[in-house]
Image (tube, rainbow, N blue to C red):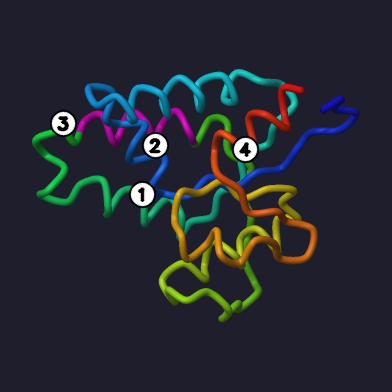
Amino acid sequence: MQNKRRVKIVVDTNLWISYLMPLSRSGNAVRQQLNRLLVSEDIDFLFSKELFDELATTAKRRKFRRYFDTSHVDDLIEMLVEVAVIVEVQSLIEICRDPKDNFLLALAKDGLADHMISGDKDLLSVKELGQTKIVKLGEFEKMFWE
């Protein structure tokens, strides 16, 4: 993909959780893929207060404590704040099979995201919302780097 303008993306919380799990094979792969995207000057990472809140809350759950320290969560959020484009979400979207994921769709809509990247089947089943295509991380990488 030849980039004449910055590509706006929303990355689902589940991928940031995987990013924090470098000891697992899939976590390590996700970390490498997201790191390549994070250093790209052609990508804007769209975030909202709700996405940051969900990341902090989810990643600090007891079930994840054996995979990473909560200080790693704080470090990740601190790093993401530096690269994030903060979107003030106004839209109310109610189309996802899992209502808890609708806030991500609203973020994508209000941020005019080109892509939402997720591994969540409920979000992936939406496929697209307006101009936003909802794809897996590997699919996005193939499109972006080609």
In the displayed structure, 18 sits above or below 39; it is below
Q: CA distance from mark 1 to mark 3?
A: 14 Å
Give the amino acid at mark 2.
Ile
Q: Which quadrant of the structure image shows residue 4?
A: top right
**Residue 79 highlighted magenta (yes or no):** yes
Estimate the spatial distance between the alpha carbons at disc 2 and disc 4, rounded to whole Å.
Answer: 25 Å
The magenta segment? 71-80
Left or right, residue 127 beside residue 5: left
- For disc 2, the marked residue is 77
Label 4 residue SS: helix
**Any magenta on residue 114?**
no
Viewer-nearest of labels 2 and 4?
4
Q: Which residue is mark 3?
A: 69
Which of the marked residues, 2 or 4, is nearer the chain's N terminus?
2
Query: Which is in the foreground here, disc 2 or disc 3?
Result: 3
In three-dimensional space, the C-alpha distance between marks 3 and 4, rounded to whole angstroms, equals: 30 Å
